[in-house]
Image (cartoon, helix red, strand yellow):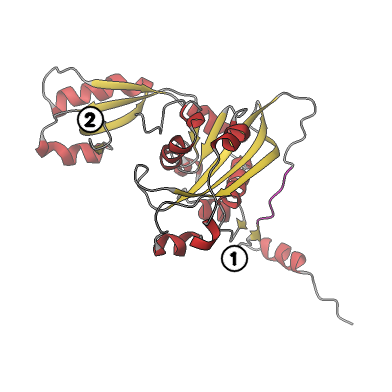
Amino acid sequence: MTVQPTLAEIAGMLEQSPDYRVLRRLVPRSEFTPGDGQSTRTAILLDVETTGLDPVRDEIIELGMVKFSYLADGRIGQVIDTFSCFNQPSIAIPAEITGLTGITEQMVEGHSLDEERINAFASDAVVTIAHNAAFDRKFMERYARLFTHKAWACSVSEVEWRSHRFEGSRLSYLLMKAGLFHEAHRAVDDCLALLEILAMTLPHLDRTVLSVLLERARRKTIRIWAEQSPFELKDELKRRGYRWSDGADGRPRSWYIDVDEPDQAPEIEYLQRTIYQRDVEIRIQVLTAFDRFSVRV
């Protein structure tokens, strides 16, 4: 009788060939690195699903969080706890949002976000990590004031994925590069998937993604405002990486850019020489993990 190879054996054979790549379904795990008595810190991964993109008008319909420990060198210890809750918004969930997230009116009916429960879960975390903190933080600051004062890190913008030989930063793509896939639609499931990405070791650095992310998040950045810059030079500013603030949220109506602290002086010199062509006072803001991505800046 011929013994048929198992699926695992077939996958193993395919992996030996350069002509095939094998993706394995992500099976969330709770244990990553034995502590061996080493001191650890606590972090939270957070993901929200919302009725839209506007952090002022739109509302959260689902919140997911995963609390985990990590060692001083950035290795992940273990999953400590998870938090998942729906929230019934004051408006009907748009059909395109249901199509995107799978969340229906029936699923959120009667549910709400309890700030005390959220605070109890998140209070001991030293950092909150989101895979687009510029989006998630602004929403969370409306629902739980605790997150206004937390340090935040963004696994999209604060990891230079291209320099680490990745062509993008979408979660599904990063999982694929790690040889994994998942088909979950819940916020907690996305957090658990992101945890696997943060646990990856970048071979050319011999460091975890989490280590690289936290190092970047600890740096100061400088927000430089090109206020009252000549309209005809807007394309020049866009090419250099400046973004537009329309002033609707209380910030200046102006182009601005975020740079690392050592790049502050050269950037101001560029504005004075190329944009204003004279010596002018430039508005700057110093940003840290405690205010970066916040609605306050």
Q: Choose between 94 and 235: the one closer to the eye.
A: 94
How busy is the neighbourhood of tag 1: few (under 14 within 10 Å), some, or many (20 plus)?
A: few
Can residue 102 be seen here? The reply is no
Residue 257 as seen in the image, left or right of residue 149: left
Residue found farthest to the right: 1
Q: At label 2, which amino acid type do we have?
A: Pro
- In the picture, measured across the screen, residue 5 lies left or right of residue 266, that is right
Magenta region's main secondary structure?
loop
Tell me the element at label 1. Answer: loop
Taking the spot 47% from the left edge, 43% from the top edge, the residue there is 161
Q: Earlier in the sequence, mark 1 or mark 2?
A: 1
Residue under the image location 27 percent in, 26 percent down: 224
Q: Where in the figure is residue 222, as x and y percent of width and height?
A: 34, 24
| Alpha carbon separation for disc pair 1 and 2 | 53 Å
Residue, disc 2 = 252
Drawn side of residue 21 relative to residue 160, left or right = right
Q: Position of residue 220 (x, y in %)?
A: 42, 22
| For residue 297, above or below residue 96 | above
Query: Between residues 88 and 58, which one lies in front from this camera angle?
Result: 88
Instruction: State the residue position of label 1.
Output: 19
Q: Amino acid at mark 1?
A: Asp
Q: Is residue 217 magenta?
A: no
Part of the protein shown in magenta: 26-30
Q: Are marks 1 and 2 in contact (CB under 8 Å)?
A: no
- Classify the position of the N terminus by image quarter: bottom right
On screen, residue 71 above or below 114: above
Q: Is residue 83 above or below residue 289?
A: below
